[in-house]
Image (cartoon, rainbow, N blue to C red):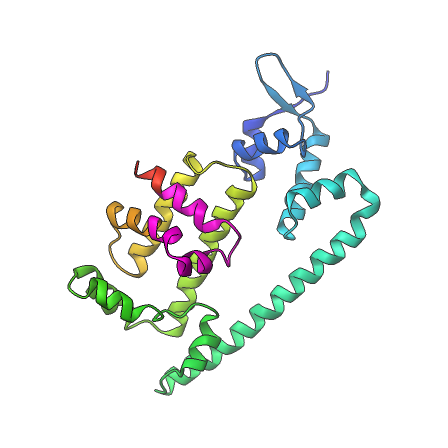
Amino acid sequence: MTTTTTIGDVARMAGVTVRTLHHYDEIALLVPSERRQNGYRGYSDDDIARLQQILAYRELGLGLDEISAILDDPAGTTGRLVDARRRIERHMDRLRGIISNLEAAIAAEEEGTAMTPEQRLEAFGDFDPVQYDDEARQQWATTDTYEESMRRTSSYTPADWQRQRSEAADLDQRFLALMDAGVAADSEDAAELVDAHRNLISRWFYECTPEIHAGLGTMYVADPRFMQNIDTAGAGLAAYLSAAIRVRYGS
């Protein structure tokens, strides 16, 4: 009898969740070789090798449908990988440009030169940290939250803002990975990321209480500007994030 590995052990070895493996099974991307009447899933060495390929293709930015097509039709692998490589190269070019702009902005600051709007846009991309200052001042000018946010951000350097953006982008990708794996917004995995999202706000801007966070979650879908900005990371992210926040606080 062929020895198989349990789904829990496979998840730990691969650094994925059991829920993700269940989803791969449901969409027939990775069907375990062994399945007993009690629901036990057993993964053979070939199954684990297929999972390694899936994860490698995911790192290249391919979607699950694309990966399935590649694995089930090896003849089409080359063309799809070439497309993936081109996407990665374009992304790397954009990152090199951001790094260059940041170095210029940091050098200007070290020389005591204030950042111009053009430099700010180049350094921060589409995100302008003071874009909603006037609106925020009207809504929160008398609150400790607004004052704390202004106190903190007024001292941030371009490098600080870039670190904040990097952490936020990483969290966006973790949310998108859950979406891509079909993980529901009311799952434990999503709840953990909601907590990480609230902690990120508290760490960089102001003490974000659950009540404030719940209000932000509503605003993410109620205000088209916020929805559009959040969805630049991935279509549907704003709705998923909002739903996860709503469920997390039982609102």
Q: Nearer the viewer, residue 98 or 2?
A: 98
Q: Position of residue 182 (x, y in %)?
A: 54, 37
Q: Is residue 196 above or below residue 143?
A: above
The residue at the point 53 percent across, 52 percent down is 235
Tell me the quarter of the image containing the N terminus: top right
Magenta-colored span: 218-245
Residue 188 is covered by the magenta coloring: no
The residue at the point 58 percent across, 17 percent down is 39
Residue 231 is covered by the magenta coloring: yes
Q: Is residue 88 above or below residue 251?
A: below
Q: Position of residue 157 (x, y in %)?
A: 36, 74
The residue at the point 47 percent across, 52 percent down is 172
Q: Residue furthest top?
A: 37
The reply to whether residue 10 is in sight is no
Main SS class of the magenta portion in the image: helix
Q: Is residue 206 left or right of residue 53?
A: left
